[in-house]
Amino acid sequence: MQEKDHEPQMLTEAGDWRSRDLAVLWHPCTQMREHPDTLPLVPIERGEGAWLVGYDGRRYLDAVSSWWTNLFGHSEPRIAAAISRQAQTLEQVMLAGFSHAPAVRLAERLLAMAPRQPGRKPLAKVFYADNGSAGVEVALKMAFHYFHNRGEHRRTKFVALENGYHGETIGALAVGDIPLYRRVYAPLLSEALFAPSPDAYLALPGESAADCALRAADGLANLLDRHPGEICALIIEPRVQCAGGMRMHDPAYLARARQLCDAHGIFLIADEIAVGFGRTGPMFASQDSGVMPDLMCLSKGLTGGFLPLAAVLATQEIYDAFLDDSRERAFLHSHSYTGNPLACAAALATLDIFETDGVLARNRETAAKMAVLAAPFASHPHVADVRQAGMIVAFELSRDGRGRTPFPTAQKIGLKAYRAALARGVVLRPLGDVLYWMPPYCIDDAQLQLLAETTRSAIDEAVA
Ligand SMILES: *Cc1c(COP(=O)(O)O)cnc(C)c1O
């Protein structure tokens, strides 16, 4: 990738977009007070592979895959072409009463590749929504409505995990446990039950990750025992609680949770919105545990990072409980753009790339390189923990390294590291004081090297 020469007017254009933006836009997940003085706003003109390129010609390595959505790089030509072809044929038709090939083909392919488990009937139906949170709403409503249709009206509660995250809409927030996003809206949220997180960072001294996970599963078992006949489903993020600070847990947890859900006759909802599509190694993180969920939520990487789309995969048993002469027993949930053809075409092109490019095998090699580059951080005086699940590596920063004493929040270490990395041309958007690598799968050796060097400089500068 060669630096292009940029006309002087491009520089003014960057500044121009910055001020015009702040005059009219309200940004997501942002304290707007911080712009522009504490944090620069970065207008991006285009993307190329793992790079984002500003109007001033500055390049930024997208080490967080644009909020975990991008898989094969920005402006991937095959996905772009598929969207363009589809746009010239059929851009949108309502999916109630109508159908189209991209929605059908995508459902067929998702079901064919979905996790399976011996002795269980496979996932059999796909319901589309427009984004991850909407997909979570769909899964929660389906689980509740299933029991309602069966006459089990007392089953109104959901179990979720401490430190979990499932999105920002009111229903999804209710099963989330991250105070920063949840606390202020708590009076609006329906009550959920929270089971201990299997997070391996919380392991007791001498306890293995698997033992820690099984101890958390005992806590789940106790919780389920205390609420017989009241719960519809357990919702969990398999393997990695991403928004909760890239906290990782042993696959033994999901296997045990599956057994407990079966024993209590409740559904297991796997929220694979962030970890699906090869992020942790296998195509779906549930596969690490040999587990098939009853409902599986997909979004983010589903379209390769091009368009918003979510898919909720459900069992035939769940689907069948909605079949009736009465419309009230039907699942009437809908979004105007349900199953949008452009988004489905992008998703189909994404699945093609998984097949033609041997993506999961290449990811294994890339993940091994990431492990080598991350290893030296384990002895850094301000790194408490280095952890990895496939294409995710996280660095937990602390005041005293392995002592794990957090930095005072007011020190804003994560924010400082973000700024330091950005100034060096790398997008490392931390979660609190956790820095992480979650790059597009196309990241190459030189970019990985830059990422590792910049991470070290960013930590050193932030703690200085
Ligand atoms: C991002 C995320 C969501 C929400 O998806 P949006 O598209 O941002 O609404 C839900 N669950 C998990 C695990 C996520 O990481």
Image: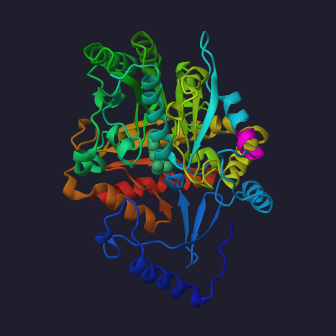
The percent position of residue 187, horizontal first and vertical second, equals: 22, 46
Quarter occupied by residue 3: bottom right
Is residue 442 part of the magenta span, yes or no? no
**Residue 132 vs residue 56, the one in the foreground:** 132
Q: Is residue 450 something that shows in the picture?
A: yes
Q: Nearer the viewer, residue 329 or 210?
A: 329
Task: State the residue at coordinates (21%, 53%).
Answer: 409
- Is residue 267 shown left or right of residue 322? left
Looking at the rendering, the stretch of residues picked out in magenta corresponds to: 100-106
Dominant SS type (magenta):
helix
Q: Is residue 230 shown above or below 164? A: above
Residue 213 horizontal/vertical position (percent): 37, 20
**Residue 103 belongs to magenta span:** yes
Q: Quadrant of residue 92?
A: bottom right
The residue nearer to you, when weighing 154 against 284, is 154
* Picture quarter with the C terminus: bottom left
Task: Please determine whether, in this image, residue 214 is positioned above or below residue 428.
Answer: above
Q: Is residue 299 left or right of residue 456?
A: right
For the point 73% across and 45% down, the residue is 99
Q: Is residue 72 left or right of residue 251?
A: right
Q: Is residue 399 visible?
A: no
Q: Does residue 63 lie above or below 422 as drawn?
A: above
On screen, residue 204 above or below 371: above
Which quadrant does the N terminus fall into?
Answer: bottom right
Q: Residue 234: give x, y in percent of width and height.
A: 40, 26
Instruction: Return the x and y of residue 202 as percentages of the image width and height.
Output: 29, 28
Q: Is residue 361 left or right of residue 39?
A: right
Give the total of numbered labels. Answer: 0
